Amino acid sequence: MPHESAPRRRTGAYLAIAAIVASVGGAFAWTAGWLTPDRLTPARMTDAIEATSTTPYPGFRRAHAKGLCVVGHFEGTPDGAALSRARVFADARTPLIGRMSIGGGSPYGLDAQARVRSMALVLRGGDGSEWRMAMNSFPFFGAASAEAFFAQTQASAADPATGKPDPARMAAFAAAHPAAQRFAAWAKSAPWSDSFANTPYNGIHAYRFTGDRGEQLVRWSMRPQAPFVEMTAAQREAAEGDYLQDELRARLAEGPVRWDMVVTVAGPGDDPSDPSTPWPDDRTQVIAGTVVLTGAQDQATGACRDLNFDPTIVPGGVALSDDPILAARAAVYAQSFDRREREVARGADVDGTPPQESTR
């Protein structure tokens, strides 16, 4: 088989970046907007995210529009309780509501062909606390700063003539941003899992845990207990549109599905403010608990439908780090949520879908 030409490989890499920017755009954005002469606001950032797609879907999430509600509980561990005084680690069981989704702004996306998969959770502690998490299958982010992410979003805007980003514009962005190049390399080389259930989900941002060991900077991932099975390109092409959702429902019919919450403690030189740089593999890791999913519901009527999975909502014992992208997420989450609610109130109807089914 002949090798791909270098220009073709580069074009594929840039389009991989663009696709993932479109997938996760709603999850990473800007603060109130006084950091630039243009006074970039959450509304303008959300507009830029919407521009990555040529087709609007009123009433749906601006990113990860297609998903499945899930329910279950979180089981804390003593090791987790030593790291953080958050109630969820001390309690044997904490109820949770979640959402499994694929990247992209279309609610009709093909499950198996989406490069990004995501897990979002709301844990409600026995003390009335609430912890919201938003995690993705990529292990690090493709931009080192909010400024870089905004430029990446602009470069990923869809050309109305083709419905796709301009490869030359993406190439220019990537040439100036090493983090984007690393991310494209991951997108092209990492194996694809064949299930939501055997995919790891990464928080990528750093947080501060306070517990018996004092205050420590950490990141966490949800590591699946189900064994990894790779899905080939041919299998992805042949899969039905709702493949991942159907496969997860079938697993849950057989019993609970679990992920261990693995907390990585920062070491010397680890930068908590840069989500584009992975921490070394030799850092201390602690299994702080287990996510247990027991059921799934359609997102149109499920418990996750009206939830805003803002990852800056944390319980006592957990605090935000100095990561500016993490701090910025709340404003755009709120902007996107408000737009969806207004659209639904006006009777949003997507291709004949009743308003109550077009909310998430």
Image (cartoon, grey):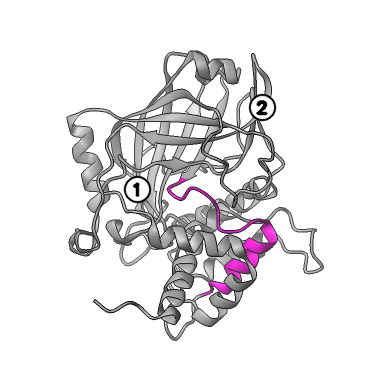
Q: How many marks?
A: 2
| Residue at x 73%, y 64% (from the top left corner) | 40
**Frontmost residue, 345 versus 218:** 218
Q: Amino acid at mark 2?
A: Gln
- Secondary element at tag 1: loop
Residue 101 in sight here: yes
Q: Identify residue for label 2.
A: 216
Q: Identify residue for label 1.
A: 300
Which label sits on residue 80? none
Q: Amino acid at mark 1?
A: Ala
Q: Where does the image place residue 182, in percent across and percent down from the top left?
A: 53, 60
- Which residues are the magenta region? 136-157
| Residue at x 21%, y 36% (from the top left corner) | 251
| Residue farthest to the right, as pictured | 37
Mark 2 is surrounded, within 10 Å at the Cα level, by few (under 14), some (14 to 19) or many (20 or more) other residues, namely some
Would residue 103 be found to the left or right of residue 126 on screen?
Answer: left
| Residue at x 49%, y 66% (from the top left corner) | 17
Q: Where does the image place residue 162, in percent across and percent down from the top left?
A: 42, 83
